[in-house]
Image (cartoon, rainbow, N blue to C red):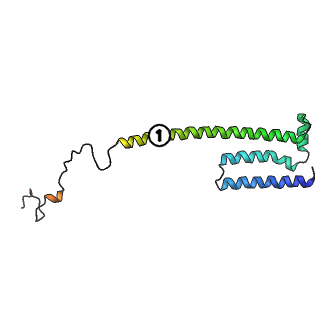
């Protein structure tokens, strides 16, 4: 590969790292996923900065066409990433189902309660207000000073 291609790869890798960190800082990407992407970028970065590294790995593993090795590793990475996302999605679906059931139970319980302002023990009789028992002079009818 030419020097310009390696330079392009290095710039692209640096750009990817900056974008990942920015997304985590803006809270558009959870730190857990940011770490996964950063680790994968750091693991792939030496291929951009060290010419011949992919050829050496391919030779060590007996692969005749080095880009095929990169493709196989990339597919494996995305398969593992898809599996992890599927596991999280399943957990979130279960959590959503449980929360929906709990909300339905709470709604049912609220529907069975009497409306606010009424009391089950109240049979309609109310005690008179303290002010209504005062005489015209403001004294209580039971007041001995009267």
Q: In percent of the image, x 91 and y 42: which residue is there?
A: 55
Q: Residue 136, relative to residue 117: is it above or below?
A: below
Q: Is residue 22 left or right of residue 100?
A: right
Q: Classify residue 107 by image quadrant.
A: top left
Q: Is residue 68 left or right of residue 81?
A: right
Which of the two residues, 63 or 35, is positioned nearer the viewer here?
63
Q: What residue is pinned by disc 1?
A: 102
Q: Classify residue 85 by image quadrant.
A: top right
Q: Position of residue 9 (x, y in %)?
A: 85, 52
Q: Position of residue 10 (x, y in %)?
A: 84, 53
Q: In percent of the image, x 27 and y 43: which residue is there?
A: 120
Q: Is residue 55 left or right of residue 79?
A: right
Task: Identify the secondary structure beneath mark 1.
Answer: helix
Q: Position of residue 130 (x, y in %)?
A: 17, 57
Q: In percent of the image, x 18 and y 51: which residue is there?
A: 127
Q: Position of residue 105 (x, y in %)?
A: 43, 39
Q: Residue furthest top?
A: 62
Total residue callouts: 1
Question: Which of the image's four quarters has the C terminus?
Answer: bottom left
Tell me the crowding category of disc 1: few under 14, some 14 to 19, or many 20 or more residues within 10 angstroms, Cα based. Answer: few
Q: In percent of the image, x 62 and y 40: which residue is there?
A: 89
């Amino acid at each position: 590969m030419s020097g310009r291609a390696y330079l392009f790869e290095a710039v692209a890798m640096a750009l990817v790292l900056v974008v990942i960190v920015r997304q985590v800082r803006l809270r558009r990407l959870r730190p857990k996923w940011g770490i996964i992407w950063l680790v994968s970028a750091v693991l792939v970065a030496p291929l951009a900065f060290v010419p011949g590294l992919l050829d050496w790995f391919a030779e060590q593993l007996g692969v005749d066409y080095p880009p095929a090795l990169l493709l196989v590793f990339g597919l494996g990475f995305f398969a593992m990433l898809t599996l992890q996302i599927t596991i999280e999605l399943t957990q979130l679906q279960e959590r959503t189902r449980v929360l929906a059931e709990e909300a339905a139970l709470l709604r049912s319980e609220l529907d069975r309660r009497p409306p606010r302002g009424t009391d089950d023990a109240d049979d309609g009789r109310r005690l008179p207000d303290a002010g209504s028992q005062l005489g015209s002079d403001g004294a209580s009818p039971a007041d001995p000073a009267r």
